[in-house]
Image: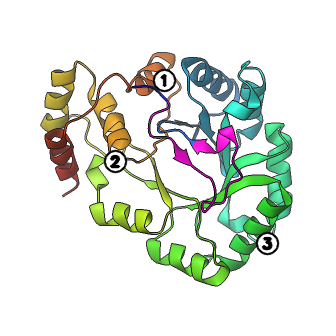
Amino acid sequence: MSACENTYPLGPGTNGIGHDSEMLPPVGFGTWRLRGSACYQAVADALEVGYRHIDTATMYENEREVGRAVAGSGVPREEVLLATKLPPDHAGRERRTLEASLRALGVDQVDLWLIHWPPGRGAGIDTWERFLALRDEGLVRAVGVSNYATSQLDELARATGEAPAVNQIRWGPGVYDAEVLDAHRRRNVILEGYSPFKSTDLGHPVLAEVAGRHGVTPAQVVLRWHVDRGVPVIPKSANRERIASNFDVFGFSLDDEELRRIDGLGR
């Protein structure tokens, strides 16, 4: 098994244009609450370990550090999928916000741009239309959303004929819902999980038992569960050892019984 297993194409039909950095890796690196030199070092460490998807957002106020770390990593730009997000209160200022993100990141294009939350009461159809237009201009390679309900995904698709490539939502064994996952797959929308550890009790006996069986940690079991369930995930850490440990989940896999037991933590 390798770090490339189960990559998710942001290709035709999912708002992409056939580029190496449009293969969404199964394990990416989140940067929420990382700032300044700590953010720079964490992203540099993640890239050195092997992560090739770095997730940030305008509201994280760390795009400049993320961009510097990517530029200084020695990893070719086309191998790194850079994602950032539009704050909902920037609806109506999509172009200016995106251009500011591009300057901060030091790139000509963002690989994946998400609406961070639905702006206002609805799904943000006007904002989604502007997202699609900016993508078509070439400023973005693929576009998606975050924290959307499936009904809101449908609202965007009905209005524009295009569903988001990705919906990034809180996900983990503790909040597992097979119907939600299946609903995304039926719509050809990639469900990407954030806060995998905050969504789960890492001390749960089931995780401890499965971890002991494989000689790994409960956190690694949680991440491997995402991989085996086909859900890309973006854990975050500022600790180099934990950054490496979170990426070291490709040397084992979970069997069907283990997956079912872990699924059960969401009931």
Disc 2 residue crowd, few under 14, some 14–19, many 20+, Cα 10 Å: many
Q: Which mark is residue 92?
A: 3
User: Residue at (29%, 44%) from the top-left corner?
Assistant: 200
* Residues drawn in magenta: 4-23
Determine which residue is flagged by label 2: 172
Determine which residue is flagged by label 1: 243
User: Residue at (18%, 42%) from the top-left corner?
Assistant: 256
**Mark 3 or mark 1: whose residue is earlier in sequence:** 3
Residue 159 drawn at (x, y percent): 64, 83
* Residue 122 in view (yes/no): no
The N terminus lies in quadrant: top left
* Residue 127 in view (yes/no): yes
Number of marks drawn: 3
Residue 258 shown in magenta: no
Left or right: 73 with respect to 148? Answer: right
Position of 53 relative to 133 (above/below): above
Q: Indicate the quadrant where residue 91 lies.
A: bottom right
Which is nearer the eye, 149 or 188? 188
Front: mark 3 or 2: 2
User: Residue at (66%, 33%) from the top-left corner?
Assistant: 35
Residue 113 drawn at (x, y percent): 68, 54
Q: Are marks 2 and 1 in contact (CB under 8 Å)?
A: no
